[in-house]
Image (tube, rainbow, N blue to C red):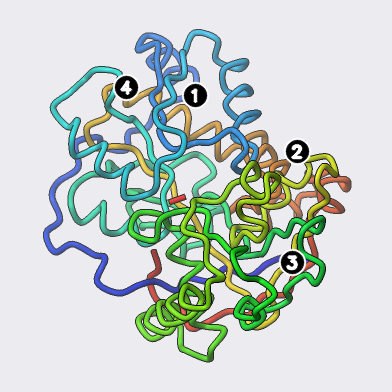
Amino acid sequence: MTRLMSTSILTGLALAVALPASLPATAQTLDELTAAATSEGMLTTIALPHSWCGYGDVIAGFKAKYPGINVNELNPDAGSADELEAIRSNKDNKGPQAPDVVDVGLAFGPSAQAEGLLAPYKVSTWDTIPADVKDADGHWFGDYYGVMAFMVNTDLVENVPATFADLLKPEYVGQVSLTGDPRTSNQAILAVMAAGMARGAAPGADAAKAGLEFFKELNEAGNFVPVTGRAGTLAQGTTPILITWDYNALTWRDGLQGNPPAEVVVPSDAVLAGVYVQGISAHAPQPNAAKLWMEYLYSDEGQLGWLKGYCHPIRFNDLVARGVVPQELLDALPPAAPTRPPCSRRSSR
């Protein structure tokens, strides 16, 4: 079932002063752009784990299509805030530690734009990106979305939790973990938000407050494990229950190959969908390679690459309408019917 996109955020993330971007969106043919990017010879990415949204295969596909461009991958486990800090810290650095592109939680896009960290660029498929998840001038634009879920090691957890409320039960002592730090990770921020929504709070500041109270109670009950959870910690039994995006959970489940068996559940008391966005650094050392990367990501090939990683690409409706999505990819997507909270701007991985 096609998912609706939630745009709920923690308030106060936007910065006040917008600075001019240094990379104008220019009209180049793809051949001209490819030649310019190949001349630069490198693309520097950041915070792209290969298991996230099928990024391993997506990066491999880009490298195969453009063999003259080396992909320099920085800190795959970084969060959205870390990505923007990498731009700030390296704005005068044209070396390999300066990222050309970022992939961040939705609210980080407008805040980075306001700070002058992003340059405008509109990909050739711009018109098929929904208007409510892109900056009109192209400083940031939605790339994919998923739904908050639980991943559960069923070797160790007899009764799989179906709701956030369930996680407070005594049977889950020492079992529940987030998959990021809420101070820097969009994924963890929205897990807190979802917990607050499960208590009936409105998306935004109210849900953030209620979610923090939920995790306080979870910690006091001894159920919360202060470890950044991953497939490995779930398999080892350190974090038998993970709160994570469904696409991460499904990819990790597949990777475990039943050892241990794992179940992926979308909690019924708070179905929250989260959008991520792409942007080009205003200080990109390789601006043409950055633009070519965006063209690849927003091509049918790039979008289907994300879909293979269980992420709904932002051009999903357009792809389906044109009949270019293989049926086996549609069949592999988990069923979900998320609600759509009132729209407000929302916030790393």
The residue singled out by tag 3 in the image is 265
Taking 268 as reference, is 52 above or below it?
Answer: above
Mark 4–mark 3 CB contact (< 8 Å): no
Q: Secondary structure at mark 3?
A: strand
SS for tag 1? Answer: helix
> Which of pointers 2 and 4 indicates the residue nearer the eye?
2
The first of marks 4 and 1 along the sequence is 1
Secondary structure beneath dot 4 equals loop
The earlier-in-sequence mark between 1 and 2 is: 1
Mark 3 to mark 2: distance in Å? 17 Å
Residue nearer the viewer, 263 or 53: 263
Closer to the eye: label 3 or 1? 3
Q: Residues within 10 Å of mark 3 (few under 14, many from 20)?
A: many
Q: Residue at x 46, y 61 (%)?
A: 188
Count how many numbered circles sit on residues in the image: 4
- Residue 89's spot in the image, x, y percent? 18, 35
Q: Residue 286 got which mark?
A: 4
Q: Earlier in the sequence, mark 2 or mark 4?
A: 2
> Which quarter shows the N terminus?
bottom right
Q: Is residue 203 above or below residue 99?
A: below
From the viewer's side, name the closer residue of 151 and 223: 223
The x, y position of residue 296, in whole percent, is 55, 31
Q: Residue furthest bottom?
A: 200
